[in-house]
Image (cartoon, helix red, strand yellow):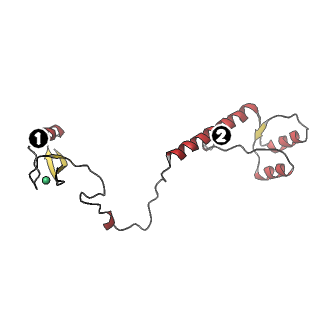
Amino acid sequence: MIRYQLQCDKDHSFEAWFTNSAAYEKQVKRKLVTCPECGSTKVAKAIMAPNVGVKGNRKSDLPVPTKQPTSPVPVDPKVAAAQQEILSAMRKLRKVVEDNAEYVGPRFAEEARKIHYNESEEKGIYGEASPSDVKELLDEGVEIHALPVLPDDQN
Ligand SMILES: [Zn+2]
């Protein structure tokens, strides 16, 4: 048996039981299902919507929660698309650097200085530097750029 919430063309809602959905279709077609309030045979399955009363919205009767439940902030699709674009541009940039520069790892500060003071041939390098290294290099006038750290690099 299936219970359906039905509604007539005058917006009366009522419940009715059917053996299955086919039985429901058949009985409604044959006008065997009538509204208990007005006798209308123009009935259809009511659209079920949570928290919305058939006659008006009764939400205002509910106590207002003091703290809103944390739900993900809806992101504007345009913003999301722009973020994806930036992310893919940064990935490309990283790829270019990784393909064309030599990875020097933690020796980055040392290698960058060598290049800067012409102790080493000019070449692209990348690696890790501590914030204090970065500050020192910049103070010395060594040209360095921070590579963006992307979300999927932090696995
Ligand atoms: Zn009715």
Taking the image as drawn, is residue 98 in sight? yes
Closer to the N terminus: mark 2 or mark 1? 1
> Residue 101 location in percent, x, y?
76, 34
The residue drawn where x is 19% and y is 54% is 11
Q: Which residue lies furthest to the front in this view?
A: 10
Q: Judge whether 151 appears above or below 121 on screen.
A: below
> Residue 136 location in percent, x, y?
83, 51
* Alpha-carbon span between mark 2 and mark 1: 62 Å
Q: Which residue lies furthest to the top in this view?
A: 99
Q: Quadrant of residue 128?
A: top right
Taking the image as drawn, is residue 104 in sight? no
Q: Judge whether 106 appears above or below 63 on screen.
A: above
Distance from mark 2 CB to nearest ligand 1 atom below 8 Å: no
Local packing at callout 1 (Cα closer than 10 Å; few below 14, some 14-19, many 20+) is some
> Residue 124 location in percent, x, y?
79, 35
Label 1 is placed on what type of residue?
Answer: Gln
Q: Mark 1 points at which residue?
A: 27
Determine whether the residue tagged by mark 2 lies in a helix, strand or loop. helix
The residue drawn where x is 29% and y is 61% is 57
Query: Tag on residue 90?
Result: 2
Local packing at callout 2 (Cα closer than 10 Å; few below 14, some 14-19, many 20+) is some
The residue drawn where x is 9% and y is 39% is 30
Label 2 is placed on what type of residue?
Answer: Met
Do residues under tags 2 and 1 come within 8 Å of each other at their CB atoms? no
Determine whether the residue tagged by mark 1 lies in a helix, strand or loop. helix
With 138 as the anchor, is 94 left or right in this view? Answer: left
With 140 as the anchor, is 19 left or right in this view? Answer: left
> Residue 89 location in percent, x, y?
64, 38
Q: Judge whether 114 appears above or below 64 on screen.
A: above
* Quadrant into which the N terminus falls: top left
- In the image, 110 versus 101, the foreground residue is 101
